[in-house]
Image: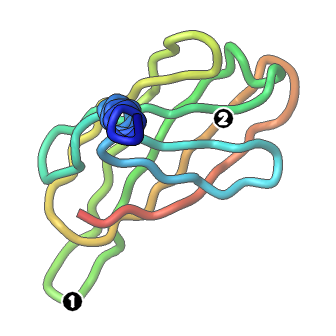
């Protein structure tokens, strides 16, 4: 009986891990919870990011993302900007190009139908 319970728990854990995102991070904002995720690990080049915005007042909002790396000695400022496509229920998808490895600053702009623009901030490491 104990081995059956162990097998069942391992199966449930395995199934839940299959549903997990390869990358997930919460962006900071006072107005709502914003989660940035990706089904595949982030890498240099083209990436698809999923943005989830909590709260009914943000459903149908216009969402865009700006990812940038400040200029450093011997390296210019780099940025990628994308409008996110609404997938419904507060979920959005944006395609971005990360030119190189390193720490990138992320700003997510949310413009609800009624209300003022919100900016959520975080950073990602490639």
- Residue drawn at (26%, 84%), measured in percent from left and top? 72
Residue 110, percent from left and from top: 66, 34
Label 1 sits on residue = 73
Residue 38, percent from left and from top: 34, 38
Q: Is residue 15 left or right of residue 57?
A: left
Q: Is residue 73 above or below residue 34?
A: below
Dividing the picture into quadrants, the one containing residue 1 is top left
Residue 26, percent from left and from top: 57, 52
Quarter of the image where the C terminus is located: bottom left
In the rendering, which numbered label is found on residue 110? 2
The residue closer to the viewer here, 35 or 105, is 35
Q: Is residue 60 left or right of residue 38?
A: right
Dividing the picture into quadrants, the one containing residue 69 is bottom left
- Residue drawn at (13%, 53%), measured in percent from left and top? 44
- Residue drawn at (17%, 77%), measured in percent from left and top? 75
Q: Earlier in the sequence, mark 1 or mark 2?
A: 1
Dividing the picture into quadrants, the one containing residue 34 is top right
Q: State how far apart marks 1 and 2 are (Cα).
A: 33 Å
Residue 76, percent from left and from top: 22, 72
Q: Count the numbered circles shown.
A: 2
The residue closer to the viewer here, 38 or 97, is 38
- Residue drawn at (32%, 54%), measured in percent from left and top? 79
Q: Is residue 105 visible?
A: yes
Q: Is residue 22 above or below residue 39?
A: below
Q: In the current view of this chain or complex, which residue is farthest to the top?
A: 88
């Amino acid at each position: 009986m104990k081995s059956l319970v162990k097998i069942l728990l391992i199966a449930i854990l395995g199934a839940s891990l299959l549903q997990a995102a390869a990358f997930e991070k919460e962006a900071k904002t006072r107005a709502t919870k914003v989660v940035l995720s990706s089904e595949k690990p982030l890498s240099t080049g083209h990436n698809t990011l999923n943005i989830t915005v909590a709260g009914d007042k943000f459903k149908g909002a216009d969402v865009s993302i700006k990812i940038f790396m400040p200029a450093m000695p011997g390296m210019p400022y780099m940025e990628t900007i994308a409008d996110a496509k609404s997938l419904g229920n507060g979920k959005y998808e944006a395609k971005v190009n990360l030119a190189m490895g390193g720490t990138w600053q992320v700003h997510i702009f949310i413009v609800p139908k009624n209300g003022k623009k919100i900016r959520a901030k975080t950073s990602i490491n490639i």
